[in-house]
Image: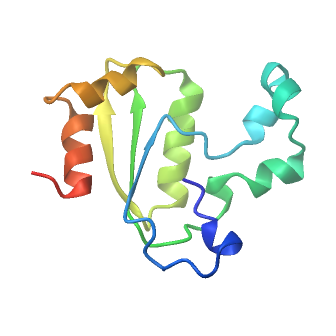
Amino acid sequence: MSGIEPRFAPDLPKKVVQAGLSLSGVYDVEPVMNTPSVNVDVRFDAAQARRVSPALLPPATDAPLYTAVGGKEQDGFHEQNRLIRAKWKSVIKDDFACPDDNHFTILDRFADRESALFKGALKMMGVK
């Protein structure tokens, strides 16, 4: 959820995005730029990394943002999650615990009616 759509389409309604749910997000792209095995394909320079890093931009709307990161993910994903929660605290609504998940299994929580992520996604959508 980059939050920059008003710059590209100023004629969109103000409330196009009602809420966002970001799983294991990358909000500051500079660490990716500094990872040679990734940047060989992405080819970011410092200016490009700043331009596409949501954590370095203000939220474009007041739509609430929900986050989740798997408890078994690499530290970098936890750092990225803390970063967006700190930078966008005006729109952060909740963080859903997924303690037993990694970067790939976190999606399985959407199929588990008892998981915090499943229940949180329904709450976010106003579904009871």
The residue depicted at 81 percent of the width and 18 percent of the height is 37
Relative side of 110 to 62, left or right: left
| Res 112 → quadrant | top left
Residue 67, x across and y down, in percent:
40, 45
The answer to whether 119 is drawn above or below residue 112 in the figure is below
Quadrant of the rendered structure where residue 33 is? top right
Q: Residue at x 50, y 41 (%)?
A: 81
**In the picture provided, is 95 more to the left or to the right than 54?**
left
Q: Which colour scheme appears in the figure?
A: rainbow
Q: How many marks?
A: 0
**Which percent across, then down, holds residue 115?**
20, 30
Residue drawn at 77 percent across, 41 percent down: 30
Residue 128 place in picture, x, y as percent: 9, 51
Q: Position of residue 114 (x, y in %)?
A: 13, 29
- Which residue does the image show at 84% across and 51% down from the upper left? 48
| Left or right, residue 119 beside residue 31 | left
Q: Nearer the viewer, residue 105 or 87?
A: 105
